[in-house]
């Protein structure tokens, strides 16, 4: 008797498997087609082949190398006519296995020459209405005369042949640079500093009504290009959107400015005693021991006094930095400065803020707090901040990052009042720009080619740091709320991802070629990483892998594949489907519940059940089957609904008695209800199905079906729910954690349409 029953179940399993295949012939055909469109296939075609430089695990390989550029720079900033003139000596070290026939040097200021093609890179048109300022700047004004004047390119006093192509300069050496050799050469130059508040430049000056100017200066010297195993020379032109690709090196910089200026920049200030007053020197020493709050180094009252004068004397500030990929500085006689020490295992770091009185009271209150929070949160997520300082400078409408220094917006009204929008905008931009020290200043990705590798990854960690800030300074945010992060929450990216596909580009695009750079390179990748952390991988696996990536590529040059591979390598989570959906396509997430059917089981033979057995050559009267009855369908008997399986199917009870011990039987469930819940997926990106089942007794149960449920059928999938309780509701993604772009199909029974009044109310919210 026992044997017969086992035989029957074997038949049933076979029948089940066959019937499943028969029900989905379309899928069978798809699998045998010529083009594999399966969303779970590995990314072999998209990824570069691993090699000796970059391994398949995502780590630097045994032959990994990077070239180095060391700089000795002397410049003078002329505050009278807003020019910079300089002389630099570059030592370029060829660690590559390749012989280099020439060198490429970046001349970023050339984007602002009068005839720069960057001015004409976009199409335009005539709008029906234009602001007077735009008419003047677009059609009535001569373009600003920016761009480098390269006066000399030489070695040991001998001119070197060089050729300038827009923002790139090719320098020829007397002979090719052999692997392992270095080449030292010098450049003399000058340029007109742009007014960044007018020209929307990443650096320049802001002019105040009394004639004073605050300078935030970067891209101010000819900089070496990166040469590596991926791009050769990365000499893709600077068109304005794609930022920078730069080699690491040591910097020795001397900057001469009016004697009444306060200046700071990348690196250690090595002649502080020569440029600080005695009082400032004392306060600086106090700040180095102040771990709980900033110490004001130059007060607002002092700055207000100093800015009234115009010194004709000069002072030279000397800064030295090791292992940085760039150098920037700020200078003005208007500046107030405060600083605080932050403890790290390998030594203290100084968190510094520099701002004019126009930034107060906001800047004195929040800037250094935000710098400290950034250093702590980012270090926890990656590695201990390795540089001696991090400076936040207030520049109007600025948000730009360099090693150890960045410029940030956030200016109160003239009477000192400010909105929450200004306050949180300022704290967020400081966290973001200081955070860039980690990505891309230390984890030195190629910004020119991949905007998301610094902006997206940085915006993701920014979200983490902002939430930390909200927890550490609850008095700074609304009561009982979280820090109002602008980007990172899944619900904030759905409008973009669900929007017009003609104006969306995949994340894996060059920043010059994308629509909506903010969503493309910042918002979407940050959200993708947040969802990966919270929903797909979980914090433990994600954080370990993310830290592995940061530590593997600290002070090196990673590519996207190095990131993608490391995240899988350190976690054992296959993520090809995730990278494909989120980073290589413009598809969106939309999963719905399309149907719920209710069943009970019985051993009373049903018409459909008997037919199925007969079709497969099994005599229904010879087997002892369990039949499935759909509610309100053929053979439905309301009296049997809601009874336990063993009540409805005594043969199941008998089977249990014959095949299980009493202890095993005690552990078996006896569900009363069976539901087939059908999920569909109008969105292209596969995601785990997160579903909350609600039952008649008022209880709820959250179930997550792994993303793999979509691997054989990308359109719809049915899951059977066997339960003691009566199902009354199904809600998909109840906590809005997957960036589902259309939630109108997320519930069963379908949620009632919101009233016209409700939608009117929502429409008027900011
Ligand atoms: Zn950024």
Image (cartoon, rainbow, N blue to C red):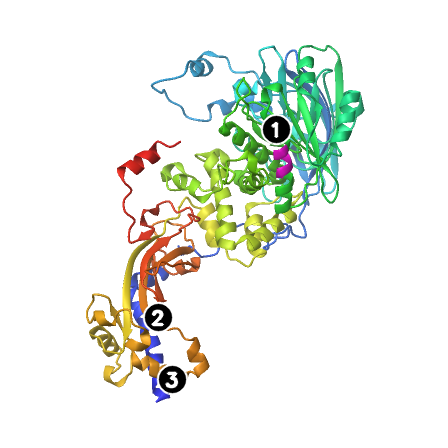
Label located before the other in sequence (1 or 2): 1
Q: Is residue 508 above or below residue 415?
A: below
Residue 547, given in percent of the width and then of the height, sits at 61, 49
Label 2 C-beta lies within 8 Å of the nearest ligand 1 atom = no
What's the distance in space between the residues labelled 3 and 1, CA to CA? 74 Å
Label located before the other in sequence (2 or 3): 3
Label of residue 199 in the image: none
Residue 644, given in percent of the width and then of the height, sits at 32, 73
Left or right: 432 in relation to 262: left
Residue 567, given in percent of the width and then of the height, sits at 56, 52
Label located before the other in sequence (3 or 1): 1
Q: Secondary structure at mark 2?
A: loop
What's the distance in space between the residues labelled 2 and 3, CA to CA? 17 Å
Task: Identify the image quadrant of residue 165.
Answer: top right
What's the distance in space between the residues labelled 1 and 2, CA to CA? 61 Å
The answer to if 378 sits in the magenta stretch is no
Label of residue 657 in the image: 3
User: Which span is picked out in magenta?
Assistant: 369-374
- Whether residue 195 is visible to the viewer of this picture, yes or no, is yes
Left or right: 141 in relation to 211: left
Residue 636, given in percent of the width and then of the height, sits at 21, 70
Majority secondary structure of magenta residues: helix
Q: Which residue is mark 2?
A: 671
For the N terminus, the image quarter is bottom left
């Amino acid at each position: 008797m026992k044997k017969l029953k086992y035989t029957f179940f074997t038949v049933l399993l076979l029948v089940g498997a066959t019937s499943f295949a028969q029900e989905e012939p379309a899928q069978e055909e798809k699998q045998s087609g010529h083009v594999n469109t399966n969303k779970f296939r590995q990314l072999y075609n998209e990824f570069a082949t691993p090699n000796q430089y970059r391994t398949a695990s995502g780590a630097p390989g045994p032959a990994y190398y990077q070239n180095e550029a060391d700089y000795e720079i002397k410049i003078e900033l002329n505050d009278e006519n807003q020019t910079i003139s300089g002389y630099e000596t570059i030592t370029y070290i060829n660690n590559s296995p390749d012989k280099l026939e020439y060198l490429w040097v970046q001349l970023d200021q050339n984007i602002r020459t009068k005839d720069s093609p960057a001015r004409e890179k976009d199409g335009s048109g005539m709008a029906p209405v234009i602001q007077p300022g735009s008419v003047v700047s677009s059609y009535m004004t001569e373009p600003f005369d920016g761009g480098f004047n390269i006066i000399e390119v030489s070695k040991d006093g001998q001119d070197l042949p060089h050729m300038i192509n827009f923002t790139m300069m090719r320098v020829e050496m007397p002979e090719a640079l052999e692997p392992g050799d270095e080449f030292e050469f010098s450049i003399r130059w000058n340029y007109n500093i742009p007014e960044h508040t007018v020209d929307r430049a990443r650096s320049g000056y802001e002019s105040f009504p009394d004639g004073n100017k605050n300078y935030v200066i970067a891209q101010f010297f000819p900089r070496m290009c990166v040469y590596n195993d991926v791009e050769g020379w990365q000499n893709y032109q600077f068109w304005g959107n794609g930022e920078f690709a730069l080699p690491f090196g040591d910097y020795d910089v001397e900057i001469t400015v009016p004697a009444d200026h306060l200046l700071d920049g990348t690196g250690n200030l090595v002649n502080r005693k020569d440029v600080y007053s005695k009082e400032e020197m004392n306060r600086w020493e106090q700040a180095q021991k102040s771990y709980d709050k900033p110490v004001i180094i130059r007060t607002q009252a002092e700055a207000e006094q100093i800015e009234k004068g115009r010194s004709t004397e000069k002072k030279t500030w000397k800064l030295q930095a090791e292992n940085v990929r760039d150098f920037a500085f700020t200078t003005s006689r208007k500046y107030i400065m405060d600083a605080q020490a932050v403890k790290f295992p390998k030594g203290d770091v100084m968190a510094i803020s520099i701002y004019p009185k126009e930034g107060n009271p906001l800047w004195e209150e929040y800037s250094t707090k935000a710098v400290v929070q950034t250093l702590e949160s980012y270090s926890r997520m990656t590695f201990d901040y390795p540089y001696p300082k991090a400076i936040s400078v207030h520049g109007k409408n600025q948000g730009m990052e360099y090693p150890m220094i960045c410029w940030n917006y956030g200016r109160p009204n003239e009477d000192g009042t400010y909105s929450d929008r200004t306050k949180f905008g300022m704290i967020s931009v400081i966290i973001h720009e200081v955070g860039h020290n980690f990505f891309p200043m230390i984890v030195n990705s190629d910004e020119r080619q991949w905007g998301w590798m610094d902006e997206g990854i940085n915006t993701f960690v920014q979200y983490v740091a902002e939430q930390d800030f909200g927890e550490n300074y609850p008095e700074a945010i609304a009561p009982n709320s979280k820090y109002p992060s602008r980007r990172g929450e899944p619900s904030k990216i759905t409008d973009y991802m669900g929007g017009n596909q003609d104006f969306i580009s995949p994340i894996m695009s060059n920043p010059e070629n994308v629509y909506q750079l903010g969503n493309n390179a910042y918002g979407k990748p940050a959200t993708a990483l947040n969802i990966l952390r919270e929903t797909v991988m979980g914090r433990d696996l994600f954080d370990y892998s993310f830290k592995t990536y940061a530590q593997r590529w600290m002070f090196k040059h990673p590519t996207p594949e190095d990131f993608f591979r490391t995240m899988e390598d350190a976690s054992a989570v296959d993520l090809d489907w995730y990278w494909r959906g989120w980073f290589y396509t413009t598809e969106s997430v939309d999963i719905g519940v399309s149907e719920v059917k209710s069943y009970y089981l019985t051993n009373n033979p049903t018409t459909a059940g008997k037919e199925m057995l007969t079709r497969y050559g099994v005599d229904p009267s010879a087997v002892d089957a369990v039949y499935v009855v759909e509610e309100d369908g053929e053979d439905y008997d309301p009296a049997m609904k809601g009874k336990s399986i063993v009540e409805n199917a005594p043969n199941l009870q008998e089977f249990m008695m014959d095949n299980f011990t009493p202890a095993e039987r005690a552990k078996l469930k006896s569900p009363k209800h069976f539901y087939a819940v059908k999920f569909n997926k109008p969105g292209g990106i596969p995601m785990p199905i997160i579903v909350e089942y609600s039952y008649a007794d008022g209880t709820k149960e959250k179930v997550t079906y792994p993303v793999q449920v979509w691997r054989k059928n990308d359109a719809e999938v049915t899951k059977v729910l066997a339960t003691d309780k009566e199902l009354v509701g199904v809600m998909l993604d109840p906590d809005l954690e997957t960036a589902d772009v259309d939630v109108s199909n997320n519930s069963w029974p379908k949620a009632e349409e919101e009233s016209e009044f409700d939608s009117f109310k929502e429409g008027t919210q900011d």
